[in-house]
Amino acid sequence: MKLRRTHTCGELRESHIGQTVILNGWVNTYRNQGALVFIDVRDRYGITQVVFETDKPELVAAAGEMRSEWVIAIQGKVTARLTGTENKNLATGKVEIKAEALEILNRCPTPPFEVTAITKEEVRKKVEEDLASEELRLEYRYLDLRRSNLQRILILRHRMNKLIRDHLDKQGFLEVETPLLGKSTPEGARDYLVPSRVWPGSWYALPQSPQLYKQLLMVAGYDRYFQIARCLRDEDLRANRQPEFTQLDVEMSFVEMDDVFQVMEGLTADVFQQCVGVTIPLPLPRIKYADAMLKYGSDKPDLRYGLEIVDIGDIAVQTEFKVFRGALESGGKVRGINVKGAAEKFSRKGLTELEEVVKRFGAKGLANVKVEPEKFNSSIEKFLPVGVQQQLRQRMAAEPGDLLLFVADTEDVVCQSLGNLRTHLAAALQMVDVTKKDYKLAWVIDFPLFTWDAEEKRWAANHHPFTAPMDEDLAKLESDTGTVRAKAYDLVINGDECGGGSIRIHSPEVQSRVFSLLGMPPEQAKGRFGFLLDALKYGAPPHGGIALGLDRWTMMLAGTANIRDVIAFPKNQRARDLMTGAPATVDAKQLKELGLEGKGGS
RNA sequence: GGGGACGUAGCUCAAUUGGUUAGAGUACCGGACUGUCGAUCCGGUGGUUGCGGGUUCGAGUCCCGUCGUCCUCGCCA
């Protein structure tokens, strides 16, 4: 290439007028008027208009051949645009380049979909609405990444990563890398496995997280560690889940929960301030797990709107309504939501749709009441004596025009169905403005250490098996296992779990007791985690930490609901890379070397 | 593994109750045009309606299967 750029396509201003410059970039758009040709040249910094005029007829002719996404170099003089032809939608819109030389660096066939950046806001919105299918855009990811929307997100992600590194560095944290090739630990998610050539029949596992390594680093005395770490889990995907994802992994020694909170809150506030200009009030609110389940039916409540769940068991027991009484008598719960002013917003069909939502989560039905000044308009009105109606009005702060919705079932079903109904209602009633930078963060604390696995008939670790119990609950570990609370915490942003961690067990004795409660005999525990148990014996400091899901953080900051938007080269919903075609078969020779003859060869 | 939605021109979409030669915008090709900026105007090319089977006088439309994509439940310590 002869013409190497002197400036980017986003930086020329009136102060550059008179200079001869060279730009390199892609043809964004071209406007051919015969004797006058305009080309907008684009790079990731912006767009600059180049004009080809009659005094250079051979240049005008060459410029007329240019097409979208050709890569070109332009040399010319920066000039002020003619009065009235400035483009206020462009940062460079007060100037243009009068072309003196043009070099074609590369041609481009007609792209499979439109990449063109559009500067005018209302036009851009229209174009964004009918983007090419995501399938096609993933196949040509390198073209899709040219779009400013994705560029903006990757730049934001870079800023966030850099900010995190700088922030933690200032606080004395060390970034330490840990292995990708490790040992499979059957607890938790499915592992991605890598066969060993040197040890035929043996396998490495790719890490689900650096959990064990970071604890070992604490034992080793690296008392403030972090890592921006890739984690891999072979589980089914979702809109906010990829098979490989990135966590900010943090671990600290000689700490209790409050120390972890303090460090992470400082980091959080810094990230939100610097990345999106939002001030997060500190300290962050803390919600007990039990309260979250009661009021929001979820351990990751969206606090941007009300629609709180209210327990009415003590009132429901006074009714003759069999569904309510039956649920209560078999140890269940009756709870409801007051949807303010929504009595007229849901037709019979609309209410049926709401009922479908709760049914998906195991509820048998959804009782509804439309509140009127004198009475309840409801199919269950006849079961609700006047006194009960009075109490319900008071308990649920019900006013005429409100819609009350109730579920009666086991506590699990009530929480799950009403919790999901709550988020469904908020979306249906457009109670969150996704275009607004509205962020509600909270810690969820006081998780139970164990949950009962009915299928396996044993206790299972709620967080992971290295989570420390609350000191005051230590004594009842074996006697009252279900009520033991964990020193565990989740960081919730707008209804998404964006981080979670715990204070770890640093005593080999407590660790052994937990393993045995999890139904893991000492021999088995030794086989799986022997190196950790050993390490805990050799002077392990009290320690704890957290991991933040950086993909989800980027989604939050960027305002997208699609995790593929925040990853340069993501997998699709079935864990395929549509661009490279991975996963794919390999040569039989490769398999033979690994001792895996037979399946999967090509 | 289960449930749901979708698949028509390079791209985004339309096509009445199953009925003539499957249309529009855009892109692309050709032409016109000296101040455009999603340039405009005139003309043109472009289709195995994902694939396979079935019902029917007749299928883009209905049925069965299959492939692909997205959302979701299970799953994700």
Image (cartoon, coloured by chain):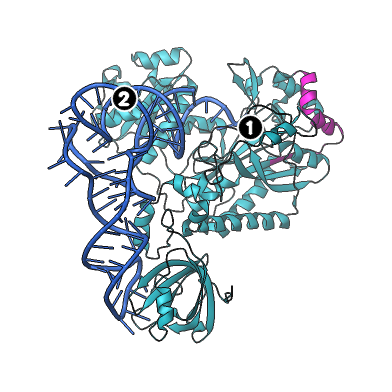
Mark whose residue sits in front, 1 or 2: 1
In the visual, does B35 lie left or right of A26?
A: left
Residue at image point 60% right, 20% down: A452
Look at the magenta stretch and give its main secondary structure.
helix
Decide if residue A210 is in sight here: yes
Chain B colour is blue
Residue type, label 2: Gln
Chain whose colour in the figure is cyan: A
Report if the CB atoms under discs 1 and 2 are less than 8 Å apart: no
Does residue A341 sit above or below A293 in this rendering?
below
Is residue A532 part of the magenta span, yes or no? yes
Which image quarter: residue B44?
Answer: bottom left
Image x and y of residue A77, in percent: 49, 84
Residue under circle 1? A601
Image x and y of residue A157, in percent: 58, 54
Residue under circle 2? A389
Image x and y of residue A391, in percent: 35, 26
Instruction: Specify the segment rendered in magenta.
Output: A521-545
**Quadrant location of the N terminus of chain A?**
bottom right
Residue type, label 1: Gly
